[in-house]
């Protein structure tokens, strides 16, 4: 099994920045397709960004030039740097990873972008 614990959310003004962290209970080298998702009330969970073990990244178009995802295998932690935050980025952010063909999710961290 894998436990994923997110942190770093909070309240930020439009145009501000936050860095989310997702600490894994086992080596990231054993976890595939780590990514970030987000969800707002009444909507389906939305994929935001993914980083594969080789370091290649992919982003939803709305965040491509503002967010940066990376993984630190030495710290077994996944990160998401969010710049130029907009009110539409307000959501609960979740990290996800796949271990032995099973998906694991963190508990989520709230990000609120508001003046």
Image (cartoon, rainbow, N blue to C red):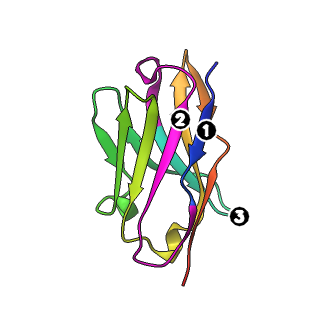
For disc 3, the marked residue is 41
Q: Secondary structure at mark 1?
A: strand
> Which of the two discs, 2 and 3, labels the residue nearer the N terminus?
2
Distance from Cα at disc 2 to Cα at disc 3? 25 Å
Q: Are there few (<14), some (14-19), or many (20+) residues within 10 Å of tag 1?
A: many
- Provide the residue designation for mark 1: 5
For the point 61% across and 30% down, which residue is it?
104
Mark 3 or mark 1: name the one nearer the start of the chain: 1
Query: Which residue has dot 2 on it?
Result: 23
Residue at 55%, 37% (x, y): give it: 96
Q: Quadrant of residue 79?
A: top left
Snapshot quadrant of residue 3: top right
Q: Is residue 13 highlighted in magenta?
A: yes
Quarter of the image where one finds residue 42:
bottom right
Identify which residue, 10 or 99, lies in the foreground. Answer: 10
The circle drawn on residue 47 is none
Q: CB under 8 Å between callouts 2 and 3?
A: no
């Amino acid at each position: 099994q894998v436990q994923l614990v997110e942190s770093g959310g909070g309240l930020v003004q439009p145009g501000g920045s936050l860095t989310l962290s997702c600490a894994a209970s086992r080596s990231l080298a054993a976890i595939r397709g780590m990514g970030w998702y987000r969800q707002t009330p009444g909507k389906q969970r939305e994929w935001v960004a993914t980083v594969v073990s080789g370091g290649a990244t992919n982003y939803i178009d709305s965040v491509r030039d503002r967010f940066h995802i990376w993984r630190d295998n030495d710290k077994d932690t996944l990160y998401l740097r969010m710049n130029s935050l907009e009110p539409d980025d307000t959501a609960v952010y979740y990290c996800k990873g796949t271990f032995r063909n099973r998906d694991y999710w963190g508990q989520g961290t709230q990000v609120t972008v508001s003046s």
